[in-house]
Image (cartoon, rainbow, N blue to C red):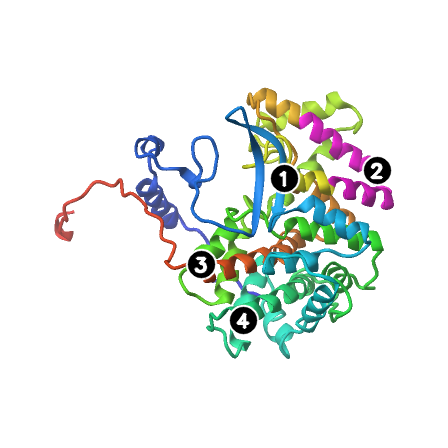
Amino acid sequence: MASHYPFSKVTPQLEELAALCVGSSDIAPELYLEHNVYCGLRDLNGKGVLTGLTEISDIVSKKEVNGELVPCDGELYYRGYNVRDLIKGFTDDNRFGFEETTYLLLFGELPDRQQLDTFIKLIGTYRRLPSSFVRDIVLKSPSEDLMNTIARSVLSLYAYDDFPNDLSIPNVLRQSLELIALFPMLTVYSYQAKRYYLDGDGLVIHRPKKNLSTAENILCLLREDSRYTELEAKVLDISLVLHAEHGGGNNSSFTTHVVTSSGTDTYSAVTAALCSLKGPKHGGANLKVMGMFDELKKTVSDWTNDDEITAYLQKLLNKEAFDRSGLIYGMGHAVYSISDPRARIFKGYVEKLASEKHMEREFDLYSRVERLAAELIAKKRRIYKGVSANIDFYSGFCYSMLGLPLELYTPLFAAARIAGWSAHRIEELVNGKKIIRPAYLNVRPRAEYVPLSER
């Protein structure tokens, strides 16, 4: 079991020193405007500052009408293909799509039947951790936060690789395919270690099955009886597809480019991306949605009463409920305004799962909150471009219906996004000629050195 460091407690002395840190780090907001510096690499209109080129994916949230850019229904493209069409294609054929999507992201084109079958078999052969890895690495140091356990495991895989520093594309592709295949195992095994050592529950370790899809393997590895319905696996598969990539500018993919540009190894680059995704402003957002709805369900007595729901949502906006942040979690997006295409696609499948699980009442509540929250936010903040539900609004509800523990929500995001990270890493290695090093303007005035005896 992990032990606490002896000096982990914050003391009054540290509080005092922390105040000095804050005082010496606080930069006046007006200086950003004065020097035309874009906070978060976003301009005054919230649009991302162009920092690179990519062919991997694209987001459309505005269209030109009469020479002006106006908000439109959001669209998401992987390698030029509309994700909506990709999902319709494999669902119409009644097959799983994450492996095909991974192939597309990595190689830039859709596979034919033989190419897809060969690729699926290749991924299956890589679903094998080094001997004693689970015992020596995963189980030895469990953590309350699985993202830390997974990150440590990825870094540890460096030591088991005979060519960890080889940056040739064939070798990096081999490393990427192994990580894509291993992430579901690292995710579930990290949870099982935490569940056994920290929560005091039983320890169940299943072996992955080569003939199953990624989504099926996740459910098979996680559940004690390894059983699941076809719809459960198909909905989880669609979730993986929708989370696999999201434009080159998302925080973790950008991190992948930045760290890769330094010339470091694959395991270090992927670990950096994991650390980025862990943040609640990125991969952990659906946990906030779940917490908010838990409180809503306890506060609102009649889930069909729009007035009662609206009153609670108003309290959220007024910082009087939940975490008092003033946010309705799951609503709004940095890029999309009228609609998040991922949420629109996913909602239909979540509804089917809710029907199978006899949770139509909960799904109706989510739909009502989505409608009422959009109206309230637009009115309160005078957002005329529109505000809509994002993918996090429904993903947490979906995972709860699948019986997935909260600790797995963000790691599952990573198990999907490793496909996009791998594509971005290879793209940076192929095209990157210089280390990514943005400029920071120093606004601290110069100071004269004062000898210690005179201070």
Q: Which residues lie in the magenta part? A: 347-373
Q: How many marks?
A: 4
Q: Nearer the viewer, mark 4 or mark 2?
A: 4
Q: Is residue 117 left or right of residue 422?
A: right
Residue 143 at x, y percent in the picture: 59, 61
Residue 351 at x, y percent in the picture: 80, 40
Type of secondary structure dominating the magenta stretch: helix
Q: Which residue is mark 3?
A: 431
Q: Which residue is mark 4?
A: 170
Q: Which residue is mark 1?
A: 75
Residue visible at 74% across and 46% down in the picture: 398
> Is 341 above or below relative to 316?
below
Q: Quadrant of the N terminus?
A: bottom right
Q: Nearer the viewer, mark 1 or mark 2?
A: 1
Using the image as rendered, state which of residue 303 and residue 128 is in the foreground. 128
Of callouts 1 and 2, the N-terminal one: 1
**Amino acid beneath label 1:** Glu
Q: Which residue is mark 2?
A: 360
Of callouts 4 and 2, the N-terminal one: 4
Residue 3 at x, y percent in the picture: 54, 65
Of callouts 2 and 3, the N-terminal one: 2
